[in-house]
Amino acid sequence: MPGAVTFTIPGKPFAKQRPRFSRKSGRAFTPGQTVSFERQVGQIAVPLFPAPIEGPVRLTVTAVFEPAASWSNKKRLAHLGRPHTQKPDLDNLEKAVLDGLNRIAFADDAQVADVRKEKRWGERAETIVTVEAI
């Protein structure tokens, strides 16, 4: 697959949640919000990938967080483009995107050999993802 594929996931960046355990059955299950987000990622990516990439893959994830509406204009402007150092953790944001792309952009997330990721403040909440064969 030549070149890189870039797409945007609208809305607040989502971090993969820990598995939950059912007291009744004793089994682990993935929380509904995580399943929903991974499904959304897949729906956005499916039309962009006619077939999963074969071989090593580079993934770039940029999580953009919107400043709170209660912030002053001065504080808002001071933060735009700057690193976001609050929760959620960057690793969990990456994992949610990876799992959503599994079997769509690549056959297995083990193919991802290079990851570049960042969290920053921006005008609107979104996650920008680039996938490319290396």
Image (spheres, rainbow, N blue to C red):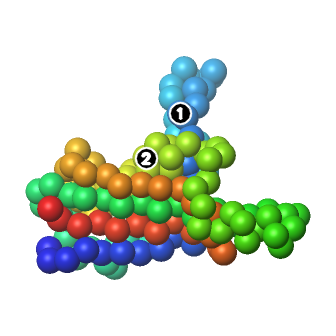
- Residue sitting at x 23%, y 44%: 110
Disc marking residue 95: 2
Residue underneath mark 1 = 19
Secondary structure at badge 1 equals: loop
Q: Amino acid at mark 1?
A: Pro
Q: Is residue 75 left or right of residue 1?
A: right
- Residue sitting at x 46%, y 69%: 128
Disc marking residue 123: none
What percent of the width, then of the height, locates residue 82? 60, 61
Q: Nearer the viewer, residue 23 or 131?
A: 131
Q: Nearer the viewer, residue 41 or 27?
A: 41
Q: Is residue 77 left or right of residue 41?
A: right
Q: Quadrant of the C terminus?
A: bottom left
What percent of the width, then of the height, locates residue 46? 34, 72
What percent of the width, then of the height, locates residue 51? 19, 70
Q: Amino acid at mark 2?
A: Lys
